[in-house]
Image: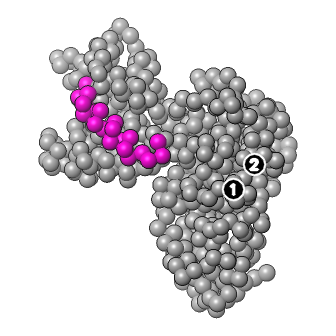
Amino acid sequence: MAVRRGILDRKYIFEYDVGRWTYGTIQVLRDRENSQLKMCKTVPKAQLRMLNGDSISRLQSLADLQHPHISSVNEVLEDQSNIYVLSDACEGGDVADWLTRIEDSNWLQEQTCAAYVRQVTLAMVHSHAAQVYHHDLRPSNLLLSSKLPDATVKVTGFGLAPVLDPDNGIVQRNGNAYVAPEVLSGSDHLRDGSADIWSIGAIAHTLLVNRAPKESSGKNGWNLAARVRNNEDEGWSERSHLSRDFVMRALMPAGERPTAAKLLQHPWLKGMIPIGGPHLTEKTDVAREARHKTLCYTLAVLLVPVLVPYRDFEQLRIAFQQSDPDHDGLIDKRMAARLLMSRCSISEAVTAAVSIADVGKEDIVDLCGAACADLIAREFFAAGPTGAPLAGPLRATDLAPRMLRRFFEVFGDRRQAAVQCHSIRTKLRTATARDFESFAGVRYDEILGSLPEEKNIDSQELASQLSVNAGRGTPLAGMELEPLRDSSPWSSSLGMDFGGLLASCGMGSKRAESPHSMRLF
């Protein structure tokens, strides 16, 4: 039923009803001034038990949450009876509606599932870094930019539940398979984003096996995750081991779930949506920049052991650990920039260097990325001493040739721009390299394994091999999974072969591919 109120009629024209959501109804309105479509979430005040004087201002502050995969709040209005939360409408509808149109005989390609889950996780990383949580994440909150299979996912609703329903009373009365067990039971006060991690696992479950997780009788969902582990739910036998591992880790008890930033590093997402791949060979500015960012990152990894003294790297490592309060080995870009500003006071140099080190545009940085950004900022973007003027340009496409020249100055023969692999290995035997491998997830043997032995390597061949390598031997290739606890009811005995990831991910599925499926590589 259409909801028309005076405060809305002044700015918007009613278009159509969408339906209900946890806290009220949803309509689509058209802006009278610019004809843009807006999604309007209507919340009856009568059902809100804990509405107070600052609730509207807190909702309005959510407009500051801006990210490519977040449908941000545009405006918050109220009248005597309702609160209206407005955001941009998306032409493709939402994932819940999309899933209802997929027949049981169709089988979503696993790359499609991973692509959607990764975009939701990217949005979560950004919002959690701002200490904004969802607590009501479900497929209907995942909007699609278009009806095409390669649509962009935009998450709506971040920050609404903690304001409208801080004690979870409403969501408990309207529970569903995507709400974390601790939210439904009220057994734990929500102090962080772990409930959102559960929801991501449940959404990934639905995308992968065409159905929502069944309700679990266990307090923390242990029975559910055990069924995933043992292939008891139909469809898991046709999915990759890593997709199951991803879901199981997200469905662990609240205190044992990974953070959103850590979940984003899971080999399932890294392997299905790799940094490299044929799309990087395209002749576009975006592909060219991505290629050069990957090359600059890998060159920095190789240069750190020689150009960064051991004590200098040790200071950076300790400062990084102190900047990582949840101890997941990852910090957001803003924190990384503040950390590196204590080592290089030129903010433009630091900002540009961190952006280059964030090759996957994840808005998070690990110790390896921080060390690479630190090297780039101080050795290449700051001309000489820390306080000296900038030495731009600051784009990866301009930086890559400068880093290649420096690489051959450090590792090669000054008389010719060429180097041999054994010479690189010899100069990498430093205390910094030892700690870089121990603490930053770098494996130099694996990086150098792609380079030819017993022959001179020139600049062109080095750039080509490192670009094709796409971060192999560095955290860009994905984290190594720690085994799930043996005492856990869903301890994993999957025996995964990470090197064979692509061969195991959904290839040879027995079901027909959905017309909505997309191939990413």
| Amino acid carrying mark 1 in the image | Ser
Residue 434 vs residue 43: left or right? Answer: left
- Are the two marked residues, 2 and 1, in contact with CB atoms closer than 8 angstroms? yes
Point 14% across, 40% down: residue: 384
Q: Could one spot residue 306 in this view of the protein? A: yes
List the residue tagged with mark 1: 187
Give the residue displayed 67% in from the left and 87% down from the top: 81
Q: Residue lying at the far bottom in this picture: please name it.
A: 6
Residue 420 drawn above or below residue 221: above
- Name the mark on residue 138: none
- Density class for disc 1 (Cα within 10 Å; few <14, some 14-19, many ≥20) is few
- The percent position of residue 489, horizontal first and vertical second, equals 74, 34
Asked if residue 207 can be seen in this view, the reply is no
Quadrant of the image occupied by residue 298: top left
Q: From the viewer's perspective, is 468 left or right of 342?
A: right
Q: Which residue appears at 44% of the width and 29% of the height?
A: 441
- Is residue 72 found left or right of 378 in the rendered image? right
Badge count:
2
Q: At which x and y percent is residue 42?
A: 67, 78
Q: Please identify the quadrant where the C terminus is shown.
A: top right
Question: Residue 318: within the magenta?
Answer: yes
Quadrant location of residue 223? top right
The residue that label 2 is drawn on is 219
Dot 2: within a 10 Å radius of its alpha carbon, few (fewer than 14), some, or many (20 or more) residues? Answer: some
Q: Which residue is drawn at 78% across and 42% down?
A: 224
**Is disc 2 placed on a helix, strand or loop?**
loop
Magenta span covers which residues?
306-327
Q: Which amino acid does label 2 sit on?
A: Lys
